[in-house]
Structure formats: structure tokens, C-alpha cells
Amino acid sequence: MKILGRVENNTSKKGTLVYVVANLFDADGKLICCVYTILENDLSAGSKVGFEMSTYSYTNFAIDDIASYEVYAYPTQFNYSW
């Protein structure tokens, strides 16, 4: 299955290494699969860009098993502790 969409940067800052994540759920609300992609280019403030991701490596469910989903995007965050 391919997931196609468009993400918009609705912040005032450029997004660098933006992850787009889709969580797929069954009818009971149980997580079936989590897929993600990383946008190839930075996402400037106010801009929109299309994305595509695939569930090709997940073969233990059928498309009909998916009852709901959530999709979100976020920039890479680094957390260093010394």
C-alpha cells in the first residue's frame, strides 16, 4: 500500500530533516503498523510539499484491516547529554 499526502509547515521556522509518520490502526484501535519517510529537502516556513511512503515491508495485514490512521510530521530533534 502507498500512502500519499502533503505536509505544510505552519510554523515560522524552516523544518530540517522533517519526518512524516503514519500510524495505522485496526477497528479495535490497536496499532497495526507505523510507517515513516523523511522529506528530501528542508521545508521552509509556510511551504507545502508532497510525500509518499509505502507499507511494502509489512506483510502481516491487509488494507481492509485498517480502520483508522493518524499522520503527523516533525523536524529532527537531537538530545545530547554529557
Image (spheres, rainbow, N blue to C red):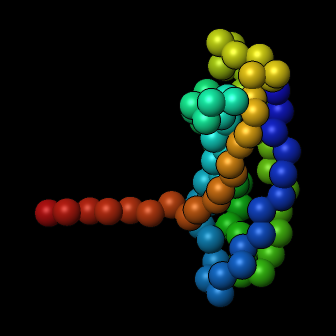
Counting the numbered discs, the total is: 0
**Residue at the left extreme?**
82
Instruction: Residue at 26%, 62% (x, y): give it.
Output: 80
Query: Residue 56 occupies which quadrant of the picture?
Result: top right
Give the camera-side residue of 42 and 1: 1
Can residue 29 be seen?
Answer: yes
Find the residue positioned furthest to the bottom. 12
- 53 w.r.t. 15: above or below: above
Residue 45 x, y percent position in the rendering: 71, 81
Does residue 33 show up? no
Residue 23 position by quadrant: top right
In which quadrant will I find the C terminus?
bottom left
Q: Residue at x 56, y 64 (%)?
A: 75
Q: Quick check: 37 left or right of 78?
A: right
Q: Nearer the viewer, residue 26 or 8?
A: 26
Which residue in the rendered view is the most extreme toward the front? 28
Residue at (63, 47) in percent of width and height: 21
Q: Is residue 70 above or below residue 8?
A: above
Tell me: residue 49, above or below residue 58.
below
Q: Nearer the viewer, residue 29 or 78?
A: 29
Q: Residue drawn at (77%, 17%), measured in percent from left and top?
A: 62
Q: Quadrant of the image for the N terminus?
A: top right
Q: Residue 28: percent from the left, percent from the top?
A: 62, 30
Indicate the position of residue 55 as horizontal and vertical percent values. 72, 27
Question: Residue 11: horizontal and vertical position, in percent?
Answer: 66, 82
